[in-house]
Image (cartoon, helix red, strand yellow):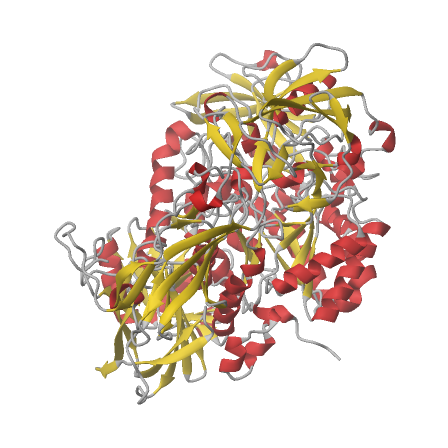
Amino acid sequence: MAVDNPLSYPSSKKPFSLETFRDPPREYRGAPFWGWVTKQEKEATLEQINMFEEMGMGGFHMHTRVGLDIPYMGEEFMDIVEGCVDKAKEKGMYAFLYDEDRWPSGFAGGKVLEGHPEHKHLHLLFTPWAYGEEIGYTKPDFPIANAAPMRSELGDLLAAYAIKLQDGRLASSRRVSAAQDILPGETVWYAYAEPLPDSGFFGDQTYTDLLSSDMTERFIELTHEVYKKHVGKDFGGVVPSMFTDEPQYCPMSTLSVAEKLQDVFLPWTRKIIESFREAQGGDLLELLPQLIWDPVEQESNIVKYQFLDHVCSLFSSNYIGVLAKWCAKNNLYCTGHMNAEPTLSSQTAQTGEVMRCYREMQFPGIDMLCDKRELNTAKQAASVSRQYGRSGLMSELYGVTGWQFTFEGHKGQGDWQAALGVTLRVHHLFWSTMEGEAKRDYPGCIGYQSPWWKEYKQIEDHFARVNSALTRGRPVTRVAVIHPVESFWLCFGPKDRNSEEVDYREKAFSELTDWLLKGHIDFDFISESLFPELTDVELIGNTLPVGKCNYEVVIVPNLRTIRSTTLTRLQRFSAEGGKVIVAGITPTLVDAQIPSTPPTIPGSTTLSWSKAQILSSLQPHRDLDMNVSDTTLYRAQGTRADSLFYQMREDGEERYVFICNTDRKESCPVTLSITGEWAVEALETFAGSSWEVAAEQSNGRTSFKYWFDGCESVILRLSPGKAGSKARNQTILRRHYQQIGDVKLESITLEEPNTLLLDYCDYKWNDEPWQGPEEVLAVDQLLRRRLDLFLKGAKFRQPYTIPQSKRNGIGKLRLRFHINSKVKVNDSTLAIESPHKVKAFLDGKHFDLTPGGWWVDKSIKTVPFPEISEGSHALELEYDYGMLTNLERVYLLGQFGVNVRGRKSTIVPLDLKDVEFGDITRQSLPFYSGNLTYHTTFISDGQTPLALRVAHFAGPAVSVDVDGQRSALLVHEPYAVELGTLPNGSHKVDFTCYGNRHNSFGAVHLVPGKTNWLNADSWRSDYDWWSEEYVLGQIGILNAPRVEVPGLEVPKQVRRGLTLHV
């Protein structure tokens, strides 16, 4: 019997029920990247599926990453895949496929090129220096791990050109056979089609040619067909989709200065000259210089426009299109995301236009790293998903956020994306192990290594409940925007001649999206290349049908050129009574060429590039108004609540509105006014509860007040009718309760032993003298450079590609860590990786490293440590050092304190009775990264309702247990919980502040503020990015939790003349 793909959200086709909302099925839940990063063993791998289930996940993406040590796609690998699919089936979960060994997709772990060199990735090098000549710059030396180009001099000469420039524009170009043919005023330039050098990252191959459908067919044969053979019977059910990750071709570069000698790189493929001639009618080799410089007497560079359009078509058809068609034929959804999605410049260089690439995908997706807020990235993909009638949108999110990313961050980043259409969250990242380099693979890790992992179900339940509403019916979107990328193509040239227009167009692209979304006008982009197939001119009326969507208004924003097919459709739409707004610059070109008559849209409205004018013109098409209802410290009454994002869905007679506060700290009290007369039900996604909202109706609108605290969100279920007898106003913890005192701290409990981080050491190679001290990861890199081994870091070869003959030790390495103690220490343990490969000595005496347990990760073993007396001690570790040796930090664990002063750590006595509310890194626990519980008490009079608030803490989340029962997990503002009326007398409250692993495993020598890009290289910074002193993060409950009772809390002093902000 055929089953519905879970990503089609079959439960959303049934009538809404509160039971489903309270306990959402797995189709609504996320599916993290599950990084397979070691010598995966089947039993241990399958055990981790239980953890996904406990965390509330719907499934998992099986995803190889740095450290895999079993052959990719081999029999052992596929046996584990089969086992995971079977176990997912047993649990009613989903096993999602990923199509590559690491990323970018398309090379099948190096297998595609084995015996097929014709599928090598190519780029075109346009250069003033012939092969063999001295070049005018220092060639960069970086590990090749994607399609980013570098001059290889491994290719073939296609042509040489005599180039003559005039004021930075192309005056003339002609093919020449030799440099001697150059005339005065001309310069010779060469065009080479060349591959990149082989790379260990690609299995001693290069990347592949994703502009070639033949390559894609071979990639499918080696990947998709293998998965089909082993788990194809579960395609479309337990196995919903195949993820393709950052597929790419050579990014198109430009000259920095038009008249400067510089290498330029262009995307290329073996048959591009023929395919360009067939598609555009020109000789690409003859026209090639016009891709570098704009011709002198041309209003626009039609060749560059045609080239970018053609390359985008090749990529979207020959790679994404071929994959998606195979997936459709085999009952799978094709999902994943493109590279360089967010800006006009990035997508021009790397995809041409990103929206076209989503066309064939059954479930388009995006990538959101570093807690960025790329609104256009989400809008582009969501627009295609809506217009093609796809069921949702995927987002790979939370990556590169580091260990200190909080539950508030998880909720906040997921909320705004849900408002913009994301339904499937692919969490980055759950490691199968932290062994070796894996622990620096774009952390943090959401798996069992994070001490909060068992609490994550609260976050997952929230998003599953959000999805139970936002996958119903269809989105209510009345406004469309013509995507401006094709006009941007015309200014994609030498930076000294184009930077002002580039900056203007990028700014305008970002501004319009900001104005609309923060002005509460939902919209979709229209891709000009997709418009013709989505809209039949004959069906256009006073609304514009674009695929599955219909729009009342179309904005034409700052276009320089417009496609003739777009112009025809907008002219028809305007003639039928539709509203067309031409905002900013009016297009003067059609299909990038000067038309015989200027392009016009009779009946359209022309506006200057003005937020006020555009929003005012759209007022009649607004479904939702949200204005600030109460003046606060940062918001003025009556202004638009621009931190709130929303999505509205229409499902039969009902509507569902999701609203989230994108400001994670500041409150936003609002008056909501919704078109229509509705009975309003608030669906509380954290509690799984609902209540009727008291609302007023007049003039065909429904209005009520709502207070959004920082990072707060709600789903409003709208049903035709009026508020019922049980309708009430919202209870606002921040406003309706006042502080009467603090809880009393009785004691503190640590969930794990305290930690001494040992990361600086002396080192000794064979019989050479001791050197150092040096940080342990730096020692590893020093030896690797010396011994000509691959360097550890963000990009290096997979262990499974290294034969056994090269795994043997090369020499003896000794590391000597210094331990200073002001107290005698018994019963401590050493936490160390691979102790069976290490010999250990304390003060010259050997001691046994037989493991007795593990700490944080099962690969980090704990072994009994000898007694430490007061004074200084030397811990020596001896390694048979080789290519795959992991030199890592080691840790001393025990019931002691640690005092850090700058770069020096000393063991000191620890009495937990001395630990108070505040940052524990200053209270003898600087490297502690586990959970800690504050045991407190307070008194109830037995009559007054009470609330507790933890106003200031540093950690992922805080749980509150009253008299042994869980009351709340505090994730976002106001970090408070109502307790109701408790019995008279004393009550026990345990506040658990969940830890993170930054202070023990993070980049604790990276200077703050230098970067938000946390990858393996962040642990190996140098110069002014490196701090010898420890850079630790605050952790703990920083202020005593408050006991609160009903009442209005008024500040004791006026702040900026305001008394209403609490």
Residue at horizontal 34 percent and vertical 73 percent from the top? 576
* Quadrant in the rendering for residue 345: top left
Residue at image coords 83%, 56%:
79
Residue name at image x 79 percent, y 56 percent: 43
User: Where's residue 948, x and y in %?
Assistant: 36, 63
User: Can residue 423 be seen at all in this image of the molecule?
Assistant: no
Q: Give left or right: position of 245 versus 581.
A: right
Relative image position of residue 276 (x, y in whole percent): 61, 43
Q: Quadrant of the N terminus?
A: bottom right
Nearer to me, 143 or 664: 664
Farthest residue, direction left: 1057
Can you say whether 313 is above or below 568 in the image?
above
Tell me: 968 left or right of 358.
Answer: left
Q: Dividing the image into 4 quarters, which one contains the C terminus?
A: bottom left
Above/below status of 588 relative to 888:
below
- Which quadrant of the figure has residue 918? top left
On the question of residue 714 being in view, the answer is yes
Please provide percent x and percent y for residue 852. 74, 44
Q: Nearer the viewer, residue 620 or 824?
A: 824
Front-lying residue, 716 or 125: 716
> In the drawing, does residue 833 fall left or right of residue 566?
right
